[in-house]
Amino acid sequence: MKEKIMKESIDLFDKKGFSDTSIQDIVDLIGVTKGTFYYYFKSKQELLRDIHLSYLERLLMEQKKILQDESKNYKEKLLAIIHLTVSKIKDEGKMARIVFREMRHLNEDNLNQIKMKRKEFRLNFQQILEEGVQQGEFNETIRTDILSFAILGMVNRSYYWFNPDGEISAEELSDLYLKLILEGIDRRS
């Protein structure tokens, strides 16, 4: 039931926004009582936090697999993580939009918890860039800290406009992003 509450809440938050969705809206949609909601969540705030954590923890787990893949060079790892982020739009686009759009509604304790997960994800991007510089794959003059923010900003905004069933696929968009990034950081001979 907890997963069902989360799933239906994501749909409502995506349509109406977090602030305009009440607990009553959620339980009416599912056909349960408020008591059922409160059995699984202390508040709507806790529900929002759990939605964020669920999304970010799964993303981090998949990102770590890419980081640990010794068969990939750093350009391939960078592409794989960009693709991971972009490909989530088709299966988890609503959830991703909630994670980015509704973060402002988290209270300070929950926000700090989410910020730590987001920072971990960003630092993993930065790690790929730093190791790629050390291995000579990327230009040694880049600011890996700034570039990791830039890449995430570009990729994360895709949730607002990218249509995975549209004219280009997630793979093509990921390749386009990587090409855009590498033309600025690719080591020239």
Image (tube, helix red, strand yellow):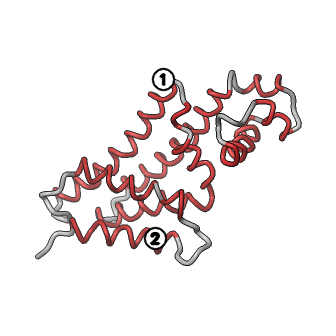
Q: Name which residue type carries label 1.
A: Glu
Q: Is residue 39 left or right of residue 87?
A: right
Q: Name which residue type carries label 2.
A: Leu
User: Is residue 134 or residue 46 the one in the foreground?
Assistant: 46
Quarter placement of the C terminus: bottom left
Instruction: Locate residue 79: give its quadrant.
Output: bottom left
Circle 2 packing at 10 Å, graded few (<14), some (14-19), many (20+), is some
Please, is residue 40 above or below residue 57 in the view? Answer: above
Quarter placement of the N terminus: top right
| Dot label at residue 117 | none
Q: Secondary structure at mark 2?
A: helix
Residue at image position (38%, 58%) is: 69
Compute the Cα span from label 1 to label 2.
35 Å
Q: Position of residue 157 (x, y in %)?
A: 46, 56
Q: Which residue is mark 1?
A: 108
Instruction: Locate residue 105: give its quadrant.
Output: top right
Q: Looking at the image, is mark 1 or mark 2 earlier in the sequence?
A: 1
